[in-house]
Amino acid sequence: MDEPDNRNELDLSQLHDVGHYAVDRLVEHLTRLPDGPVYQPVPSHERQTILSQPLPLDGVDPRQIIVDILDDLFRFPMGNNHPRFFGWVNSPAAPVSIIASLLSAGLNPSCAGGDHAAIYLERVVLDWIKLLLGIPGDAMGLLVGGGSAANLIGLAVARHVLLARAGWDIRGRGLNGAPPLAILMTDQSHSSITKAVELMGMGSKSIRLVPADHHYRMDIGELARILENECGGERASAIVVANAGTVNTGAVDPINEIAELCAEHGLWLHVDGAYGAPAILADETRHLFRGLGRADSIAVDPHKWLYVPVDCGCVIVRDEPAMRQTFSMVPPYLKDSSGAPPWFSEYTYEQTRPFRALKLWAALRERGVAGYRADISHDLRLARRLGNQIQESSDFELVAPVTLSVVAFRYRPAGLSADADKIDSLNSALPRAVQEQGRIFLSGTTLGGRPVLRACFVNFRTTERDVDEILDAVRAAAPK
Ligand SMILES: *Cc1c(COP(=O)(O)O)cnc(C)c1O
């Protein structure tokens, strides 16, 4: 008989040994990280080794599995735990949150709902996020997979509410024949908004781009004009998506003025603060977020500027009953008579949900509001330091004001300064060239049709000395 009667005992002693070994090696990895390259491309033979592994037919010793992870996979990280990583919007993982991730996997609850500690912990961290962002306490929130999910959920509730107001039952009837609904936003909005609009069957043609000003913020005069002239008539209504920190330049739309117009015209205001919303904590940027508490729905990503390990997004909706009406569906096998609050799964499309709250709760407790305020101010200062260095140099140009912690810039060496096409091709080739050198990590984007470089600071490990490497590293990586 192959009775696995001692399987549990065996597993737990291995968990102990392998766990200690893994944590020791992880700490060693993180300690040595700053001395090595921020990034190195995966060589083609290593890529093949990873890709060609056969399905294991027999079990492998757990210690060997952990050794393989640490010896092989940890050699080729994305780079975002490193102090000189400035790509996209990817932060390092807060150490206490790493351990909390391990423990949440160990506890392994589903946070769909019910009466267990994880459910109440999610409610408390959502209350904390509302307090941090200045959102009224009766708003409903959820931890989700990221900004994309948060935007999708916020927009889905918006659509449900606006169409219900126009007498249309979207859940029963779908979109066929529904009164049209417009999405108003600038061309700086994140692609996840467009994806959500497409996924909801509204079609990206229902997006009306509102012109931005020369600082890449929504032009409030243009929004007012569009609302006066174009959004009456056959439109049921409109959803305005305001950016609270764009990926391209960190621009923050004038939220309070937009909220004013939305209130006047009966529109829904969704604020995408996936990256930028935590900057409401810093004295120097708080004023940019005036009116955030007036938004109908908000997306914020704790896995970006709150340094929580991926994944941890958050959506907040002011009107709790509307959010429940958008998603609630309780089949007989999920009826709960415990007296616990309504299940989170009544407020989203997911049923089984991970225990994201634990790693966020741990990070918020470790740093406290004061710690986050200091970390975020530090990131803002580093961005301004780079912005100043660019303005003082003759071979770089700043292409957008440094509002939050993104710096958008171009390299224009003396010999090329008159040749726009050559400068364009240089700047579009630079991100990969810089990345391959391994000194610093930048990514690129396009602004006004031209390729630009961008450095984003969401990293509690970065120092001023790391920032001081950036321009030199770009010069060194440029083809001679
Ligand atoms: C990152 C980001 C998103 C998408 O969030 P994910 O967590 O990547 O799904 C949306 N909007 C903004 C402004 C972002 O920075």
Image (spheres, helix red, strand yellow):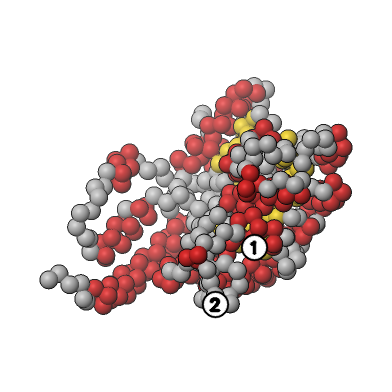
Dividing the picture into quadrants, the one containing residue 409 is: top right
Q: Is residue 268 left or right of residue 257?
A: left
The residue type indicated by label 2 comes to Ser
The residue at 27%/75% (across/down) is 8
x 87%, y 49%: residue: 264
Q: Position of residue 119 (x, y in %)?
A: 55, 71
Pick the front one: 309 or 267: 267
The mark nearer the N terminus, 2 or 1, is: 1
Q: Is residue 164 visible?
A: yes
Which residue matches tag 2? Answer: 338
Q: Position of residue 155 (x, y in %)?
A: 66, 48
- Asked where in the image residue 120 lies, by quadrant, the reply is bottom right
Q: Is residue 328 left or right of residue 211?
A: left
**Quick check: is the Cβ at mark 1 less than 8 Å away from ligand 1?**
no
Q: Secondary structure at mark 1?
A: strand
* In the foreground, 263 or 369: 263
The quarter of the picture where the N terminus appears is bottom left
Labels 2, 1: front one: 2
Q: Report how far apart the C-alphas of labels 2 and 1 lie in the structure.
A: 22 Å
Residue 273 lies, in percent from the top left, at 68, 53
Q: Judging from the image, what secondary structure is the residue with disc 2 in?
A: loop
Few, some or many residues within 10 Å of mark 1 (<14, 14–19, 20+): many
Q: Which residue is mark 1?
A: 141
Determine whether the beta carbon of the residue marked 2 sits less than 8 angstroms from the nearest atom of ligand 1: no
Q: Which three-letter amino acid code belongs to the residue tagged 1?
A: Gly
